[in-house]
Image: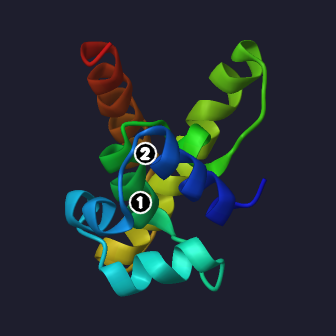
Amino acid sequence: MLLKDRLRKLLDEKNIKPAELARLSGVSEAMLSYYLSGKREPMGKTCFKLANALNVSIDELLGTPFSDEQKEKTSSKTTEKAFVNMYIETFGHEPSTDDIEKAISLLRAAHEFNK
């Protein structure tokens, strides 16, 4: 399933209109329209914003179809890639290995806290 289709499905499942998702995520309605039409795909921190606004994991948003064991193994890789992209977008250079490890630890702690 394409990202545009997963976004539509999540909007339907959660009974959220695109304008509401734009407001909740801080992504403009125009850009969200591009994502929903498949003309563009969100990158880095935009994926985090959309997943957070929809209350889903990055894996669910991106449609990573794995077993629970595989999800656990790939989740940190997916998170690391998304973090690196977001870090580069924000600071203009790649984070150190230590920065990545600290961020992943913080994300895991936040995830456990929200369970």
Label 1 to label 2, Cα distance in Å? 7 Å
Tell me the SS state at disc 2: helix
> For the residue labelled by badge 1, is the local secondary structure a helix, a strand or a loop?
loop
Residue in front for this viewpoint, 51 or 96: 51
Residue found 67% across the figure and 59% down from its top: 5
Residue 31 x/y as whole percent: 41, 83
Q: Residues within 10 Å of mark 1 (few under 14, many from 20)?
A: some
From the top left corner, tell me how far across and down residue 89 is, in percent.
39, 76
Res. 37 in view: yes
Q: Position of residue 57 (x, y in %)?
A: 48, 36
- Residue at numbered disc 2: 100
91 to the left or right of 48:
left
Number of dots carrying numbers: 2
Q: Is residue 23 above or below residue 98?
A: below
Q: Which is more N-terminal, label 2 or label 1?
A: 1
Asked if the residues shown at circle 1 and circle 2 are in contact, with their CB atoms under 8 angstroms apart, the answer is yes
Mark 2: which amino acid?
Ile
Specify few, some or many for label 2: CA neighbours under 10 Å numbering under 14, 14-19, or 20 or more: some
Q: Position of residue 92 (x, y in %)?
A: 37, 80
Disc 1 target residue: 95
Label 1 is placed on what type of residue? Answer: Pro
User: Residue at position x 60%, y 44% from top?
Assistant: 78
